[in-house]
Amino acid sequence: MRTVNHSTTEPLPGGLLERFFKVSQNNTGARTEVLAGVTTFVTLAYILFVYPNILKDAGMPASATFAATCVASAFATLIMGLYANYPIAVAPGMGLGAYFTYTVCAGMGLPWQTALGAVFISGVVFFLLTVTRVREWIVDGVPPVLRSAIGVGIGLFIAFIGLRNAGIVVKSEATLVTLGNMRDPGVLVAVAGLAVTSLLTARRVKGAFLIGILLTTVGAVASGVAPAPQGIGSLILLANPLHALQPVAFQLDIAGALKAGLISVLFSFTFVDMFDNIGTLIGVSRRAGLLDERGHLPRIGKALFADSLGTIFASFTGTSTVTSYIESAAGVSEGGRTGLTAVVVALLFLAAVIFAPLVALIPAQATAPVLIIVGLLMMGEVVNIRFDDFTEALPAFFTIIMMPLTYSIAQGLAFGFMSYTVVKLITGRHRENNAVTYTLTVLFILHFALG
């Protein structure tokens, strides 16, 4: 007769958790999965403060976008956990948020409501590409060198934004950009925050980014760079937390986005999100041992479905495109192997809504160090680029350099694909091109030709 150890919280085979998440089949248990979920959330929680500061530059109220980020992340992560059964957190993407704010809104002069309309349409496009498997076909057809270069370019772009927000880099009429006033109190606070956050990151402290943001905010308040909180009401929202969503929820302008003809915008949202998602899904799943014998990710269609549905939902709540987050690897390192980990993260995202007023106290100097370090970490992919092969180095260089210099991820993608296709053709290596590179190159040429 089988005995049961009632001193453990691990689920019994055949129980609800077992049927839903197959925890024993994945050699894990409830206690481990919950701990992994908490670890992932703590590691990822910095996005709740960084992201509203990015969208604030698009004219969106920070407290509302904080709440929107919480709710959209909770929804998308819950779908990832319940439907795809993966221990992966989903939240608005940093590079996609920068594109939303600095290219679509600031660069094109479009209101954020129209940009949200474009996010909705891109979510529908994601969905159609996912169910038809075209999304996987596109990803498979993109040359590895451009996959790496895209991540590096976005990293430089994000780091540049961080340096600008810190006041370390400022605009100049003579040289376009120059060094800021290093004696300015705001700059000094940002530099101190960068030093503290770098130390915590180097020592692999869990939640290093979140701790760094909070410590830098304390320093900013103490030095007079940021205002001090005025009572508990400025820190947490106790009555009807979702009330904070109202300024941005259901404000998307789909008709405006269609009228503006944002083809290049939709393309960029779609393309960047594809590589953010695929790269993260494969990277985290490899660490968790979830890939099959061919190195493929089972149920990848379900994971991409969670992303596309999450993006559509995000546009209604008032935030931009969602994507899988590499910080999920922290939970995997703690033993997370199933969607139960993601469900825990989703619940914590939802609970965090009550802190919406707190984001108004977080100055740009507190989030700038995180942007700089995230940019640094994203540049790690540069080691996979073969700079000894000119036909690989040239398109990688254009992809990387054009993103920060044009303040546009889309332009970096355009120059990267066009230069790759052309240099392979003129050097007699046309067999390295494929239907995807030719198609995208033609589309980008038409984009520039037609304005």
Image (spheres, grey):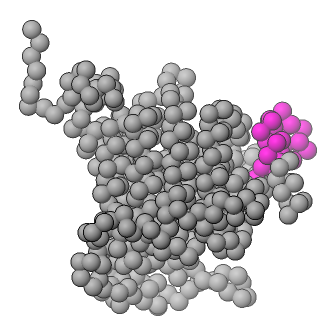
Q: Residue furthest top?
A: 1
Viewer-proximal residue, 280 or 354?
354
143 over 58 or under it: above or below: above
Viewer-proximal residue, 223 or 303?
303
Q: Main secondary structure of the magenta part?
A: helix
Counting labels gives 0
Residue lying at 35% horizontally and 87% vertically, measured from the top left: 227
451 over 124 or under it: above or below: below
| Residue 119 location (% of width, % of height) | 61, 56
| Residue 407 location (% of width, % of height) | 68, 68
Q: Is residue 164 visible?
A: yes
340 over 387 or under it: above or below: above
Residue lying at 46% horizontally and 77% vertically, measured from the top left: 364
Viewer-proximal residue, 136 or 403?
136
| Residue 193 location (% of width, % of height) | 39, 74
Please identify the quarter of the rendering in which residue 414 is found.
Answer: bottom right
Viewer-proximal residue, 379 or 331?
331
Query: Would residue 114 be found to the left or right of residue 441 on screen?
Result: left
Residue lying at 45% horizontally and 54% vertically, measured from the top left: 72
Query: Would residue 248 be found to the left or right of residue 81 on screen?
Result: right
Please identify the quarter of the rendering in which residue 29 is found.
Answer: top left
Q: Is residue 398 visible?
A: no
Magenta residue check for 53 = no
Q: Which residues are magenta?
A: 416-441
Query: Would residue 268 be found to the left or right of residue 164 on screen?
Result: right
Query: Would residue 143 be found to the left or right of residue 443 on screen?
Result: left
| Residue 60 location (% of width, % of height) | 52, 73
Magenta residue check for 419 = yes
Q: Which quarter of the image is occupied by the N terminus?
A: top left
Q: Which quarter of the image is occupied by the C terminus?
A: bottom right
Residue lying at 38% horizontally and 73% vertically, measured from the top left: 359
